[in-house]
Image (cartoon, rainbow, N blue to C red):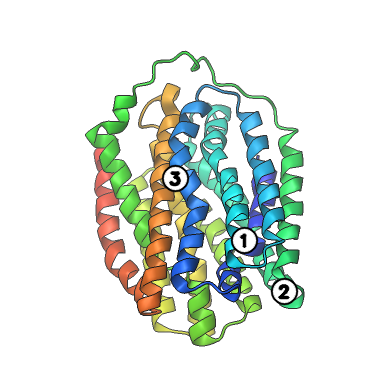
Amino acid sequence: MTLIMFLWGAGEGLFFHIQPLYIEGLGASPTQIGTVLSMMTIVPALSFIPSGYLSDRLARKPALLGSCICGVLGMAICSVARDWRDLIPGLVLYSFSMCCMPFINAYLATAARGRDLGRVYTRTVAAYTAGMVVSPILGGLLADTFSMRVVYLTSAVLFTASLGHVLFLSPQTPDGTSTALVHWRALLSPCILGFAGSVLLAFFAMHIAFPLAPNYLADVHRWSASHIGVLGSISSVGGTVLSLILGRRLGKPAAALLIGQTLVWLSVLLIAVSPAVGPVMLAYALRGSVTACRALTQARAGSLLGESNRGLALGAADSAVALAMVLASVAAGWLYRLRPTGPFVVALILMPIGMVLMGHRLDTTLE
């Protein structure tokens, strides 16, 4: 699974950080850019809970294969786009590849027998971000030298390699959970709703500054696609290192998440106040804390509803994160149109509130 995530991270890293620039180059306004980016997370936001339910009851390998195929086909469609609207079908199809996250988390949890999930998830995230260390630089160079078409096709090749390794995964079916009673009402309990609500706000605040950050650096400070690709690589290094470091602090999950959110707040502040290369590079390194925070959130969610419904709980947490990303991408587009620094200001205000609520909910659910 580590190699699969590494290859997928390498493929996604090629286009992820420079894609907003490409959408803008195809004629989209900031609001339209935010809308297009939000479409990449609408499908996961709607599907994570049912996917989590199914991951507790169906074989995981076929779902992983189907997700990889969606990713490959989605990149192929994006490579032939001639207008920003032409990207939408490919990006939506690609977004179906994200629907396998509850299956991946359930696969890992079963393989680890439910023990030390924080370290398991953070190490897997570290493999994914490690794949994104070099690929953003390569993606920026390919875009500047050739075109985004070449970037998308190269991503499709790497996703195909990831698909090939999925074929060699050992088959895994849920251990006796296919007939277990599903307590759907548990998802509506104050504990779960409170946890999901705090996750929604925290990740909305952490995400809103970044969807159009590449456009901000390019439009306001004249950064090139190649330079922004370097920032993507720096962010991946930060994500890899910080995921491993924060994953070791799971004796105090609330403290680990607080540290991660604080680092993201500092990264937004650095980008907002200084266009200099050094501070922006440091900011993107600290931005990697977002991936660590997501892994820590998944680790906590995995123990909320018990082993038989672990996938359902993971799906609920992933849905909250994905919904936060949808809303944040749309809001970022509107705020950027009003003022390029708008998303940064809102993030700096909301993140401390998210820190308090997230820490309180973690302490409550641990009692």
Amino acid on which disc 3 is placed: Ala
Lower position in the chain sequence, tag 3 or tag 2: 3
Q: Residue at x 65, y 48 (%)?
A: 71
**Depth order, front residue of 55/363:** 55
Amino acid on which disc 2 is placed: Leu
Distance (Cα) linking label 3 and label 2: 32 Å
* Rendering coords of residue 122 (x, y %): 52, 47
Amino acid on which disc 1 is placed: Asp
| Category of crowding for the residue at label 2, using alpha-carbon neighbours closer than 10 angstroms: few (below 14), some (14–19), many (at least 20) | many
* Rendering coords of residue 255 (x, y %): 34, 52
Vertical position of residue 87 compared to residue 194: above or below: below
Foreground disc of the pair 1, 2? 1
Q: Quadrant of residue 64?
A: top right
Q: Residue at x 62, y 61 (%)?
A: 86
| Category of crowding for the residue at label 1, using alpha-carbon neighbours closer than 10 angstroms: few (below 14), some (14–19), many (at least 20) | some
Q: Residue at x 31, y 62 (%)?
A: 351
Circle 3 SS class: helix
Reading the image, the residue beneath label 1 is 86
Reading the image, the residue beneath label 2 is 141
Where does the N terminus fall, quadrant-wise? top right
Q: Residue at x 27, y 32 (%)?
A: 188
Where does the C terminus fall, quadrant-wise? top left
* Rendering coords of residue 110 (x, y %): 54, 27
Reading the image, the residue beneath label 3 is 45
* Rendering coords of residue 67 (x, y %): 63, 40
Lower position in the chain sequence, tag 3 or tag 1: 3
**Depth order, front residue of 217/267:** 217
Distance (Cα) linking label 1 and label 2: 23 Å
**Depth order, front residue of 106/266:** 106
